[in-house]
Amino acid sequence: LTFLGIESSCDDSAAAVVRGDRAILASVVAGQTALHADFGGVVPEIAARAHAERLDLCVEEALAQAGLRLPDLDGIAVTAGPGLIGGVLSGVMLAKGLAAGSGLPLVGVNHLAGHALTPRLTDGVPFPYLMLLVSGGHCQFLRVDGPQDFTRLGGTIDDAPGEAFDKAAKLLGLPQPGGPSVEAAARAGDPRRFALPRPLLDRPGCDLSFSGLKTAVLRQRDDLVAAQGGLHEQDRADLCAGFQAAVAEVLAEKTRRALALTPAPVLAVAGGVAANETLRAALQRVAAEAGATFLAPPLRLCTDNAAMIAWAGIEAYQAGRRDGMELAARPRWPLDQKAAPMLGAGK
Ligand code: ATP
Ligand code: FE
């Protein structure tokens, strides 16, 4: 089986060609960071227009890199949600057009399922496993029992960790994306100098919260500015180190609980925040304690990409999933159908 994957749910336009034997024949990602740089966040209208302009070029490029033409493929997988609706629509419309023109089967993929199934694409991990998804827009623990069988064990009740890193960086005058700049600054810092909270650790379960942590950084910054007229290099480093340590500690403790709740042989991560070395080290320790293997796919497959969408499409197709021209773009689409009904503007 060979599938084309199309992804456009946030600020990356992406297309990929992936085979059922896990070979990635092509994976093209056209980011939009520069387009949104002046606005301090992703502007949905700009994102939608950029996807509409670039997606078909990404598809052409992916097919060219794979050395294949549309009729050589077995199916088309597209992110049908959740995400910014204009972008998701661009992808779904393009996929429908390609499917209608070629007669290929169409499979709508949940973006989060794409992230959650990535360890199977990169490492052939068998079910079940525990997935911690930590990105700019998402944070949740999923037990993955099958290609369409996800159980949500908990997640953030406010900000995603990547969002918190980005906001903390902004508060401290560090460049975006915040994750890498906070991590770099933290290298010279003392994580114990500032007492930052460990949100929700006192409460049972696997839910997380990050917005209070960001507010705590804001307070410490304002106190320093009031006391000494500004931030010294060392203050910044210490605040970054303290913030990063708090995020890692909270995520590690909640992961410990998730593994206790549902023992799994593998703990896998996905999402851009999985790049963070302090977090990785903490998760590695927790996994080892629980007797689980820790698995972090290569970063280009941890962040948004279309290879994961093509792969999730292949897995869903093999499980019998087919979508027609009525496939809807969904702004919201919880993965765990058992825990929550399908919401949003879809069907
Ligand atoms: P989503 O995938 O949820 O739609 P997104 O596209 O914003 O959202 P990703 O591309 O997976 O998410 O990841 C980007 C996020 O990861 C940013 O918030 C960025 O700050 C964060 N990030 C990247 N590198 C690091 C790092 N080394 N440490 C912490 N955070 C990081
Ligand atoms: Fe994503």
Image (spheres, rainbow, N blue to C red):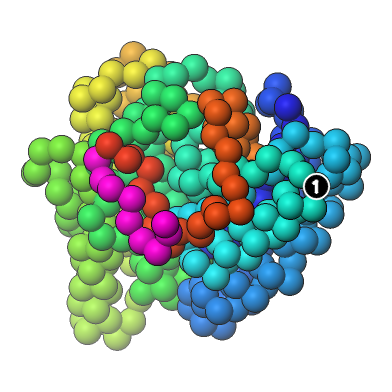
Q: Position of residue 46 (x, y in %)?
A: 60, 78
User: Can residue 183 be seen in this snapshot?
Assistant: no
51 or 271: nearer the viewer: 51
User: Can residue 195 be seen in this snapshot?
Assistant: yes
Q: Quadrant of the N terminus?
A: top right
Res 132 → quadrant: top left
- In the image, residue 106 sits, relative to residue 176, either above or below, namely above
- In the image, residue 219 sits, relative to residue 186, either above or below, namely below
Res 72 → quadrant: top right
- Main SS of the magenta part reads loop
Q: Quadrant of the C terminus?
A: bottom left
The residue tagged 1 is 102
Q: Residues within 10 Å of mark 1 (few under 14, many from 20)?
A: some
Cβ(mark 1) to ligand 2 < 8 Å?
Answer: no
Q: What residue is drawn where x is 8% and y is 44%? A: 202
Q: Secondary structure at mark 1?
A: helix
- In the image, residue 6 sits, relative to residue 104, either above or below, namely below
- In the image, residue 4 sits, relative to residue 195, either above or below, namely above
Q: Position of residue 224 (x, y in %)?
A: 25, 76
301 or 240: nearer the viewer: 301
Q: Position of residue 321 (x, y in %)?
A: 54, 34
- Mark 1: amino acid: Ser
18 or 40: nearer the viewer: 18
Q: Position of residue 103 (x, y in %)?
A: 76, 44
Q: What residue is drawn where x is 39% and y is 30%? A: 149
| In the displayed structure image, the side of residue 66 where residue 236 appears, left or right | left
Would residue 172 be counted in the magenta stretch? no
Q: What residue is drawn where x is 50% and y is 67%? A: 85
Q: Which residues are magenta?
A: 339-347
Q: What residue is drawn where x is 44% and y is 51%? A: 135
| In the displayed structure image, the side of residue 159 where residue 328 appears, left or right | right
